[in-house]
Amino acid sequence: MIRADKEKFSGGYLRLFSYIKEAKEIFRHLSFLKEFDINLDPLFENLASLSDEQRQILKKEYLVVKDIFERHKDYKEILENILRNFGYFLDNFKSIEAWLKSDEFYENFKNKKHPYPSLLNPKEINYDDISAELAFSLYLPLQPDRCNFVWFCRNSTGLGAISSFFNHMKVDFKPPYAYWDVKSWYVFLYEDKNRIISVEIGLMYILYHFIPKDIKLFCVYRDPISYIKHMINHVDWKIIPGKKIINLRTNLKSENLFSKSKNVTTKTFTPCVSSLEHPWVLDYMLNFHKAMDVLDSKNKEVYMLEFEDINFQNAFDTFTKLAYKFGFNPPSNKELFQHRVNRSNGDLFTLPVTFVAHKSDLDYIYDENKEDHKENESSFNMLGGFKILITTYQFTPERDKFLDITKEIFADRELMFKNLILLIKRDKYKAFKRNERLFLASKQYINSYVSVMEKYEQEINDKLITEEDILEYLRDYKDLRNKYKTLIEEDLRYVKKYHPEYIQKWKYYQEFLKLCEKDELETKDEN
């Protein structure tokens, strides 16, 4: 019926009865499939579009097809791969048959119960002749020339900082996008060669099944309690709609407004320690050691960094070593590595902001009660103004085009954020400085703006959950404590294997272990 409908404009329905007769013959050859506990829907969809040549191959080779299914009846994944790509299977029947009977297939896929077995021998194909979509459908492993190495990135372990460092070092990599599905990632990596693979794992651990053995990997570990703390404090990066939204630009007429972002677990503006029980936190930890299990099954050693390796004092040296180890250009500007980058707790959420200084604003005094105040009547779009970028070292590309006037504006003021900078285009600085009245008014406004921003930032920091809050909460909830103990122990078995010295230096994890030791003593006493 499907085939007849597809060919309806060329007499498809006139041939319907012959198609039915042919379909009965095909299903007679494939009747053995009823014995297998597999989904046959993909097969039905494929049969309707088989060519005459493919149908003849099926009739001629149906006994061999049956033998292949019988041979692998205990390996459901490869049978489903065949049915999903049934036309391709018939077109390449002899080579696929040889591959599925080979010792190499048994050794690398079947004996290991690999969940994504390749339908072709990866060593005997030309990847350039196969589209990315087809390669994914066939479950072909990615080739080593598709990337230089893999950054096994994990939320709350310096993801933002490392991305920033790579950008400054002009390392060609793809930032991690958790909202991509596995196929989107695979297609991207398949088509874009010679990049760094950066996989933000979440549910993406599946992708590690497609990474070949000889690609190097690195990741960052930190104290598990500090890791959980960061997740609980994490914002969802969505700007809250309404009147008071983030100012991407400001001027002498503007009100100092700072947008808030809701916490990812509480969906309010305030994090809560009870988020320890939130599925997002628990599931994320579970998915991480699922990914490590995949790598372990490949006997793949991961180059591990400890969180302190990427702090202000050590990041520059660490990435210099990484550059030589993995073969990319080493960093040159040490200053870019010596300040906080991450904004996932909501701090510095409003930056960068452009301050527009214009002489037409000099006689205007902002009054929040003034009803006729309209921002679109301001000087933002007038000619003759000066733009000052309120930003940080890490958020500013092409800094060589700007002049840093931070010290001139703030003088000896002690700023809350050491990496806050003010930049103006080099060719605009002298004219801006000559306009003494505008310069002084701008200086006064920016200082006021930053004072309000710092007050807002302090309010954010005062509400953040600490490691001590987490330990105190877990002290009162034994079942939850045991659940985390199981997850953390699973997570850390790779650290214990390669870097047991990390365990001893993690202060809060050691405190957590003391809580768990009390449980063990109590259990012994009860027995």
Image (tube, grey):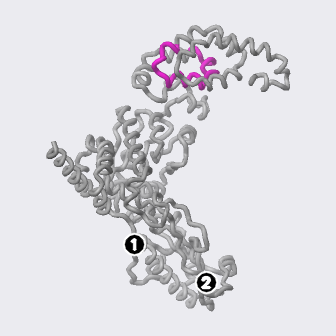
Residue 160 at x, y percent in the picture: 45, 57
Considering only order in the chain, which callout, 2 or 1, is on the residue closer to the N terminus?
A: 2
Q: What element carries label 2?
A: loop
| Mark in front: 1 vs 2 | 2
Residue 490 horizontal/vertical position (percent): 31, 42
Task: Please give the name of the residue rendered at 37% of the width and 55% of the height, measured from the top-left corner.
Answer: 276
Q: Nearer the viewer, residue 159 or 459?
A: 459
| Mark 1 and mark 2 residues within 8 Å of each other at the beta carbon | no
Q: Range of the magenta residues?
A: 68-94
Q: Is mark 1 on a helix, strand or loop?
A: loop
Task: Identify which residue is drawn at 32% across, 49% down.
Answer: 484
Q: In which quarter of the image is the N terminus?
A: top right
Q: Where is residue 52 in the image (x, y as percent from the top left)?
A: 72, 15
Q: Is residue 230 magenta?
A: no
Residue 446: mark: none
Q: Mark 1 points at which residue?
A: 418
Q: Is residue 235 left or right of residue 471?
A: right
Q: Depth check: 481 or 326 in front?
A: 481
Q: Give the image location of residue 48, x and y in percent.
A: 71, 22
User: In this orientation, which residue lies closer to the viewer: 418 or 491?
Assistant: 491
The answer to which image quadrant residue 131 occupies is top right
For label 2, count other residues whose C-alpha is less than 10 Å away and answer few (under 14), some (14-19) or many (20+): many
State the residue at coordinates (15%, 42%).
Answer: 527
Task: Farthest residue to the front: give it.
Answer: 526
Instruction: Name the magenta segment's main secondary structure.
Output: helix
Amino acid under disc 2: Lys
Q: Can residue 282 be seen in this view?
A: yes
Q: Does the magenta stretch include residue 72?
A: yes
Cα–Cα span, label 1 and label 2: 27 Å
Q: What residue type is labelled 1?
A: Lys
Residue beneath disc 2: 253
